[in-house]
Image (spheres, rainbow, N blue to C red):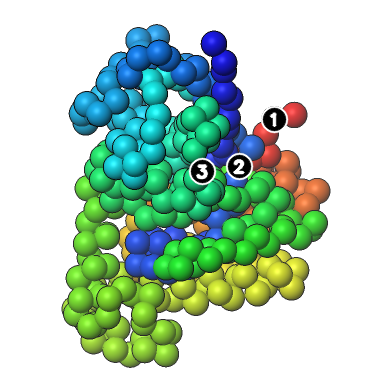
Amino acid sequence: MREFRADAPGRVNLIGEHTDYQDGFVMPSTVPQRTTAVLRPRDDRSVHAWSRQIGSEPVIFHLGAERRGAAWGDYVQGLTWVLERERYTIAGFDLHLDSDVPLGSGLSSSAALEIATLRAIRSAFELPISDVALARMAQRAEVEFVGAPVGIMDQMACSLAGERDALFLDTRSLKFERIPLPAGLELVVINSGVAHQHAGGDYVTRRRESEEAARQLGVERLRDVPVDALPQVESLPPLLARRARHIVTENARVLEARDRLTAGDLEAFGQLLNASHVSLRDDYEVSVPAVDLLVEIAQSHDGVFGARMTGGGFGGAVVIAARAGLERAVASGVSEGYASRGHWQPEVLVPRAS
Ligand code: GLA
């Protein structure tokens, strides 16, 4: 029986947080950690999926009879469910997943699973699906089947970004540009160890608040509010004003960050990361004290251009823009500084231990 192998990386967002579901701008990259999918087509219409990380029992279901409630297996069921809805013909298969993208760290283990699995399905059944369409299908599976109302950043990053690129993406048009990371820049990613849950309430609450702010401002999405309209934003009820202010200013920061990165101005790029963190912490209120502390320690470390929380928030990881050559010193300095303040030793995800 033929075997089809594919993989996809986790993503780390550089800037543009909580903007994608309001049609805004984002700029993610990827991490070295990946999810691998090995697929063997079957003669019947059943799917047997194993995850090396989560137990030895397979998730088993029949194509056309996908039912929510199979925990991680919902991500796989969601994909075949979307493929059927979009009229692609596939057969049953065995699927073995293996991943070193940590769960709940804000590095998008779910999108890595979705894209790796879809890539394996695409090659096994010779489906004519572009990388952008693949990302759209993965997002649709997560939103409509799994029930997590996420934007499209993670799936686009896992499908289209490279490790030495920033993927500047307009989430409205899905037009993107790959910006090579300047040689003087290395990313450091540290997991706080506080796990988040996205299908959970906080993300959904923020999404609703942003939708309410857009409604009260009379726009379809907050993407449609330019920064010079901030005085109008301030006239909203205080909580909605804070939420909208984050998204409006964050979109402006992403555009600026793209220009700074392209120009190789890493000091200015780092300042934008710092400003993004303040906005996420104070206006969008999606950070937690452990993550704030990691960011603060990082920002005062030698060789750091800037640092911020990355991903959906409420825990997870921080991304640090470090001067190339100093990334290992930054990673160990920040994690030791954090441990010495009475916390546990956080996990350095990037750079990887050599
Ligand atoms: C999660 C979602 C993304 C995005 C980020 C916040 O990772 O999956 O779509 O909304 O949160 O920027």
Q: Nearer the viewer, residue 280 or 112?
A: 112
User: In what element is the residue under mark 1?
Assistant: loop
Checking the image for residue 312, the label placed there is none
Q: Amino acid at mark 2?
A: Val
Could you tell me which quadrant the N terminus lies in? top right
Q: Is residue 350 left or right of residue 66?
A: right
Q: Which mark is residue 353?
A: 1
Amino acid found under the numbered disc labelled 3:
Pro
Q: Are marks 1 and 2 in contact (CB under 8 Å)?
A: no
Nearer the viewer's eye, disc 1 or disc 2? 2
Image check: 96 left or right of 337? left
Instruction: Look at 60% across and 50% down and name the residue there.
Output: 161
Q: Position of residue 143 (x, y in %)?
A: 29, 47
- The residue under the point 49% across, 30% down is 125
Q: Earlier in the sequence, mark 1 or mark 3?
A: 3
Residue type at mark 1: give it.
Ala
